[in-house]
Image: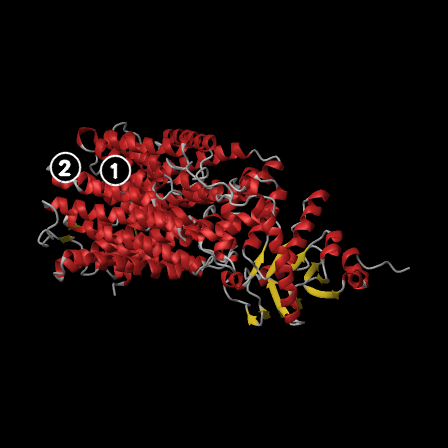
Amino acid sequence: MRVIASLVGIAAALAVVPFLGLPAFYESFLYLVFHWIVLATSWNILSGYSGYVSFGHGAFFGAGVYTTATLAARYDMPFLWTLPVAGAIAAALAVFVGLVVFRVRRVRGELFALLTLAVTFVLATIILNTPLDGGPGVYLSAVPLPKLGPSASSMFYLLSLGLAFATVLIAYLVRRARLGRGLFAIHDDEDVAEVMGVPTYRFKLAAFALSCSLAGIAGGIHALFVSYVTVGETFSITVPLTVVLMSILGGTRHWAGPAIGATVITALMYAFTAGDYAIAGKALVGMVLILVILFMPQGLLGRWRGRKKHVAPVVDVAGAASVRSQIAERRLSTDATSERAGSSPLLQIERVCKAFEGVQALRNVNLDVRAGEVLGLLGPNGSGKSTLINVVSGHFRPDAGRIAFRGREIAGIPAHRIARAGIARTYQIPRPFRELTVRENVTLAAMFGGATLPRAAAEQEAGRWLEFARLDRKALALPDELNLHQRKFLELARALAFRPQLVLLDEVLSGLNPAEIDSAVELIRDIRTQGATIVLVEHVMRAVIALADRIVVLNHGEVIAAGAPAAVMGDPAVVTAYLGAPAHA
Amino acid sequence: MPGATLLGQAVLSGVFIGALYGLLGLGLSLTWGLLGQINLAHFALAFLGAYLTYHLSTVGGLDPLVTLVVIVPGFFGLGVAMQWLFTRFRVSPLNSLLVTFGFTVIVEAVIQSIWTADFRRLESGYASINLRVGPLFVPLPELLTLAIAIALSLLAWAALRYTDIGRAMRAAAEDAPIAVAFGVNERRLAYLLSGACAALAGAAGLCLALSQTLAPAQIYAWIGVIFAVVMMGGPGRALGPLVAGIVIGVTEAVTMAVTAPSWAPVVSFSLLILFLIARPAKA
């Protein structure tokens, strides 16, 4: 709220400028500052937050320029009316590009950057060769301008001020909303984000459309500001490069970073490239850029993580007691539900197959997980345990067979929907979101998982699970500051904040020392008592025996044994799988 | 439809411009694929090389090919210096783009202050020689470019494939810590590679000077198409840029001959988009 109030204050103060009677130069200069603030900040909504760097911002800006130019010059549409159309066309173009690009799963990072760059050139060529431009450029000096403020330049000033204010506000709101959280998760690890319930495809598309529509509107205003538009100027490589530059200079992880970068660079360019020292000024801008990136790779606002601003952990001693009592309560209620569920399986896997380039990782696997049980999944390395987890959690699509969760088919549906249906998983090698704090990691799971809580409630929930996993002292640390044991527990806390019905634990105990294993076993027991069904992939035999109600053994992608722990461990086939066939005399 | 001769001439000029694309893309592709740097300065260096060739041969009276004796070692040093900067500050791939962009802007300013923003064209003895093969014209500067591009691409390919240093470079690109554990001096290799790629930019500059008109702002005109070439060829693969460059060059030239010249970019980039989306899965 304080932020919004101060943004409104700044905008209101700046809105007075045209009425002070200053020379028009100030308005034009500030217009350029606002113009670049809009472009850089809007770029940052997709590219800064999610890490998908677009070099095609010029294309969407240009789409706006030419929409307004065409509508205003050829069809005599009033200028202000063309702006929403410019935004809509740019957004539509973004959705079209995004539908193609984001669907290709492996198009990431650099490839996205180059594809968006290519879109710029394709669009420029099309406009150049069609009546939209045709080559000579479009003159807009005859277009009537609306009356807003004392002069034409104040009109542009006020329009761009309004748009800059709106854009920065949107960037701030997105940063705090579910969309922003999801984009930050995508930035760190897109696969994990998807498994945590973030609809990555939809979020990327939404952010892309939002970002581009703002650029389109800025383009519409700019078309009339320059009053003569050409393809060469509009679609030049300098637009995307400058935008990227400004954002990184300011800091892409902060909503205000691009605005600050835009202000600094516009001022630099204006101060040094106007007048007699234009060439030296250009070189100086290049120099500043190099020095900033070398010495402040995170940008001017890079260190600003807002870590210290977080309130102290919500959980206190009383809270700790309440977790325990809640667990006790839930134990009662789950006993009731599992009785009601009877023998009906929570998860049914039927004849599931999965092959990787000829290696049959899963071969007709049949497996039931009953509500409320702990199922130990065993097998030698390479037997298909992790593949099975990946197939169930939606990371891989099975080649054949069906998987039903609570009676609903989940094979082949997007991973985030499986997550929301109530399946959580951990990774053998912990994969936390590295740029988010421990608490933010867990909060994210609570926001996007089965419970889909609003942010405040999710933070409460996160606090509770951090305490549960004994990580409350580390809540504000970054994952890299944790040791392996703590990172494994972070994985657990993240899975639990989901409020899942089924938890897939992929070798949570591997790499821990005996004391740590004991505490982890205790924790898993607690997870079970609070009502979740658990599939435990594990090599640590004593833990499996201590925890599992039933055991299933995989070998070469096939189920070779299933049943009570003692019976399975005595099974000759299992012994052979682990130790090799007995030698015959 | 244009006649067979015109089409043949178009294909030929496409091969020639494609060779230049490939030569410009070669150094870029190697630093990208093997060092993880997106080096925009490659374009600036190529133009700096072109201007130096221009200067040394018009003012100094040297044969353009002889200028390489000066340019290649000089640029090798520049490349090493840049690599030192990257290592010293542990620059990430995205930030390498920005640092080298800053460097490009500086080089552009330097070029502009020495040679002005006007167009320059090298009038060398080669430019006036035109060979004729049947009905087709074969300009000598372009033919030289093609020869240099093929020779350097093959050299880079063979060096990476058959020498110990080349194998070590590929190993370090695949997994640096493991390569280091096996005794590969990753840093020294990076210096060598970076220097070699800068020298390649110098050689590409020579070809630019031989066949193109130079202006400082032209530095940016090449970025789009060269990146397309590098992507299609596959970053880090020595023969990729040349092959992709010729494919794109020929498609462009034929498009220009069949429709209007201004449609050329749409073809190359559509080709790139289709290629990226349809190419076989690679994890």
Q: N-terminal of the two: label 1 or label 2?
A: 2
Q: Give the letter of the chain under mark 1.
A: A
Q: Please identify the quarter of the rendering in which residue A395 is found.
A: bottom right
> In the orientation shown, which residue stands out farthest toward the top?
B60
Residue A557, position in %: x, y? Answer: 67, 63
Left or right of B265: which side holds A367? right
Please tell me whether residue A458 is drawn above or below residue A305 in the rendered image. below
Mark 2, Cα crowd under 10 Å, few <14 / some 14-19 / many 20+, is few
Q: Quadrant of the N terminus of chain B?
A: bottom left
Q: Chain of mark 2?
A: A
Residue at x 59% of width, y 51% of height: A323
Give the percent coordinates (x, y) of residue B163.
55, 40
Residue occupying image coordinates x 31% and y 56% = B252
The residue identified by callout 1 is A266
Q: Relative to residue A219, is residue A322 drawn left or right?
A: right
Q: Nearer the viewer, residue A224 or B204?
A: A224
Q: Nearest the camera: A581 or B182?
A: A581
Q: Residues within 10 Å of mark 1 (few under 14, many from 20)?
A: many
Which structural element holds mark 1?
helix
Relative image position of residue A129 (x, y in whole percent)? 22, 59
Q: Quadrant of residue B256?
A: bottom left
Inter-mark Cα distance, 1 to 2: 14 Å
User: SS at mark 2?
Assistant: helix
Q: Amino acid at mark 2?
A: Phe
> Is there one chain holding both mark 1 and mark 2?
yes
Asked whether residue A431 appears in the rendered view, the answer is no
Q: Position of residue B148 (x, y in %)?
A: 39, 42
Residue under pointer 2: A25
Quadrant in the rendering for residue A87: bottom left
| Amino acid type assigned to the residue bearing label 1 in the image | Thr
Does residue A123 appear in this view? yes
